Amino acid sequence: MDSSNPQHDAEDAAEALRRLAHSTRTFDDPSDTYWVLTDLAAVIRRLEQVITQVQAAHRDHLDLAHDDQGGTPAGRTNALAAVEHLGKTGELFGLAYASLDLAMSHSGSIAWYPATTGGGSGGRRPRAQARHARHETTTDVRPSARPAERAGRRSR
């Protein structure tokens, strides 16, 4: 779905993230955390792209920038300040993505076992390997399934 209204799309994205914040207050199945992280990584990359594009719009249209009283110098100063801060924001998103990628790597290596009363796995099998609710209908309980193998089975 293509849109030509960035303000409307930003409102939709904000609403989707509000719902996600609400739904992740608790996890009934901790294996779901891996797939939330992978989708969040995609969100971070897309937000980084949006920030870069908004930064470019400020930079590319400096000649149109004015303040509320119609002053060009103040408008240009504010546009350049926005460009600078958006550049810093883009860098922070890059760092956030790198850290999230490391978290995904560790999270994807976890086999989640059911809770026990005496500690340890008690010889029980993992309750589930990470699975993606939208893309997989079966649960893979092979402890040897690595994140790369699971990711290769799902398609986006």
Image (cartoon, rainbow, N blue to C red):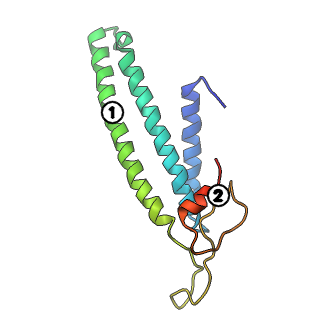
- How would you rate the neighbour count of disc 2 (Cα within 10 Å): few for under 14, some for 14-19, many for 20 or more? few
- Sequence order check: which comes first, mark 1 or mark 2? 1
Q: Which mark is residue 153?
A: 2
Q: Tell me: 138 left or right of 68.
A: right
Rendered residue at 38%/17% (across/down): 60
- How would you rate the neighbour count of disc 1 (Cα within 10 Å): few for under 14, some for 14-19, many for 20 or more? some
Q: Front-most of 26 and 120?
A: 120
29, above or below 55, in the image = below
53, above or below 29, in the image = above
The picture places residue 12, in percent across and down from the top left corner, at 59, 36
Q: Secondary structure at mark 1?
A: helix
The picture places residue 120, in percent across and down from the top left corner, at 51, 87
Mark 1 residue type: Gly
- C-alpha span from label 1 to label 2: 36 Å
- Quadrant containing the N terminus in the rendered view: top right
Mark 2 residue type: Arg
Q: Is residue 147 visible?
A: yes
Rendered residue at 55%/86% (across/down): 121
Q: Front-most of 51 and 74?
A: 51
Mark 1, residue position: 87
Q: Secondary structure at mark 2?
A: helix
